[in-house]
Image (tube, rainbow, N blue to C red):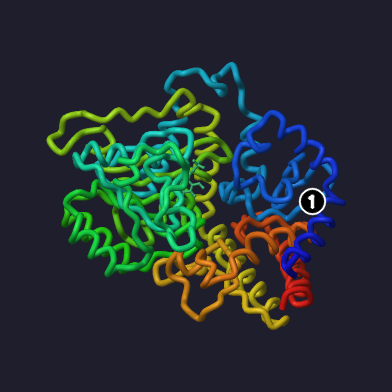
Amino acid sequence: MDKTEKLISLLESRYRKKTRKSLRLYQEAQKVLVRGGSHSIRLFAPYPFFMASAGGPCVHDLDGNAFIDYWQGHYANVLGHNPDVLRAEFRRFDPERGSLHTGFEGESQVRLAELIMSRLGYKDHKIRFTTSGALATMSAVMLAQAYTGREKILKIGGGWHGATPYLLKGVNFHGEDGFGRAESAGIPKAMLRNTLITRYNDIDRLERIFKKQGGRIAAFIVEPFLGVGGFIPASRDYLRAARRLTARYGALLIFDEIITGFRFCPSGLQTLYGIEPDITTFGKLIGGGHAVSAVEGKARILEGRNAKGKVKAKFEGGTFSSHPQYMRAGYVMLKHLVDHAGPIYGALAAAGDVLRTRVEAVFRAEGIEARCTGWGNEAVPGSSLFMVNFPRTDKAFTSAEDVWDPARCDVRLKEEVLKIALLAEDVNVVHGGGAISLAHGPSHLDRTVEAYAAAAQLFKKYLF
Ligand SMILES: Cc1ncc(COP(=O)(O)O)c(C=O)c1O
C-alpha cells in the first residue's frame, strides 16, 4: 500500500462510519441497477451516499449527514437545491390543467422559448426543446450534417457533450493516446473516424485542421467556457478564430452552452463574447430542475433544411419534450435570473472569487500548490465555477490537457483523495470543486474553506 492508498483507506473508513444506511441501500441497488445507479459520475468510490432531502446549499443523506454540495444537480441548480421561487410555483401546479404530461403543445413552451430567444436577441433563429443535453448535442450534430452534407465533426479534447455516439471520443485523457480515444465500445468505426479532436484555445492547431480538412467538416462544437474539461474560458480570439474559420470553410459553429447558458449572465455566454454561432445547445438550468434541453439556431438549419432549402433532417424532441410543468419551471427560473440579474450574477461571481482565492491559500499555508480553474477572463467578468488542481508545472491552464494529463497535474490527488477528504468534512465536490449557487452564503463558504484546510493538513501529514 503506498502512502496515497493509506490515506484513502483512512478517509474511507471515516466515510463508511457515517454512511452505514447508504452502504446498505447501495448493496441493494447493485442487485437491480447497473453498477448501483444511473450515472457513473454519481457512483464515486467507495460508494455514493444516498440522498434523503436537499435544500439550498445542502444535501442530506439517509444517515442524517448534511453535506454542503457543489455538485448542485450536475451544475443545474444555480439558485441552490429546491429554491423558494420554484417551490412556490410547484404549489400552483395542477394536473387537471395539464401540468402533467399530455402529449399536446402547451403555452408554457412558447413563453420559455420567447424568453430565451429575447435574451439572445438574434433575428431569424428558432428553438426546439428536448429532454437531455445528449439529445440536444446529438440533434445539433445531425442538423449540421444535414445542412452541410458533410460528415466530419470537430470537437475539443476534454469536451463532454453527453453520451451520444457522435461525440463519445476524446473526452477523458488516456495516457499516451491523450484525448485521442473512443470512450465506449459499440460506436461504428466510420462514426469515430468522422469525429476529429482539437485542443482548446489553440488557434494555430484550429487553423491547421481547417486548412487540411475544412471542406469536409460539418461543424465545430465547442463550449465557450470548457466545463468538465477543466472550467477554462475560451479566449475571445479563439472563439473569433472559430467563427472566422467555420464561416470560411462552410462549416457550422455549434456552441454547447449546456453548462454555460444563464450561468454567467442572463443569457448565453456567447452574448458576452459577442459571437453568434449557427447552433446553440442549452440544458441544465433552463429547466428549473427538470429534464429540459434545447437546440437553438438559425431557422433554416433548425428546420432541418439542407443548403438548397429542402427539409431533410428529422429532429424530434421526444415523448416528454416541452412537458408543461418543466417548461413552466424553466420559465420561472429564467425569469427570476433575468429580473434579478445584477445582484444574482454579481453575488455568484464574488463568491467564486472568494472561494478560489481562499482555497488556494489554505493549501499554500501547508506548502502545497493548489491552483484553481474557473476564473473568468477578458470576456467573462466573473465565474461561480471552481476546480482545484495540483499542478506539477508552471504552465497556465488553457486547455483540458493542462488539467487532465497526469504529467501536468496530480489528477489522482484531486479525483480520489480530495473527494473523500472533503466528504469526511461534510462537503461534496466533483473534480475537486463544482458550482457555487446563490444559496451558498458566507457561512457555507467559511465552512467549505475549513474543510479544504483540514484536507490540506492531512495531505501535508500523509503525502508531502
Ligand atoms: C457541456 C455539456 N454538454 C452536454 C452535456 C450532456 O447533458 P446530459 O447529461 O443532460 O445528457 C453535459 C452534461 O454534463 C455538459 O456538461
Give whichever of 338, 276 is nearer the camera. 276
Give whichever of 172, 329 is nearer the camera. 172
Q: For the point 85% across and 44% down, which residue is it? A: 20
Give the image quarter of residue 29: top right
Q: Where 107 falls versus 376 (above or below)? A: above
The location of residue 260, given as percent across then percent down, is 46, 54
Q: For the point 34% across and 60% down, which residue is it? A: 198
Q: For the point 73% across and 50% down, which residue is it? A: 46
Left or right placement of residue 7 versus residue 130 in this view? right
Q: Name the residue carrying label 1.
A: 66
Q: Is mark 1 within 8 Å of ligand 1?
A: no
Q: Where 141 falls versus 32 (above or below)? A: below
Q: Where 231 falls versus 259 (above or below)? A: below
The location of residue 326, given as percent across then percent down, is 53, 32
Give the image quarter of residue 390: bottom right
The quadrant of the rendering that contains the N terminus is bottom right
- Residue 114 seen: no
Left or right placement of residue 150 versus residue 6 in this view? left
Q: For the point 77% across and 75% down, which residue is it? A: 457
Left or right placement of residue 226 versus residue 86 in this view? left
Q: Residue furthest right?
A: 17
The location of residue 52, given as percent across then percent down, is 77, 39
Q: Secondary structure at mark 1?
A: strand
Left or right placement of residue 445 versus residue 241 in this view? right
Q: Kindly identify the amino acid type of the residue bearing the numbered disc 1.
A: Ala
- Residue 98 seen: yes
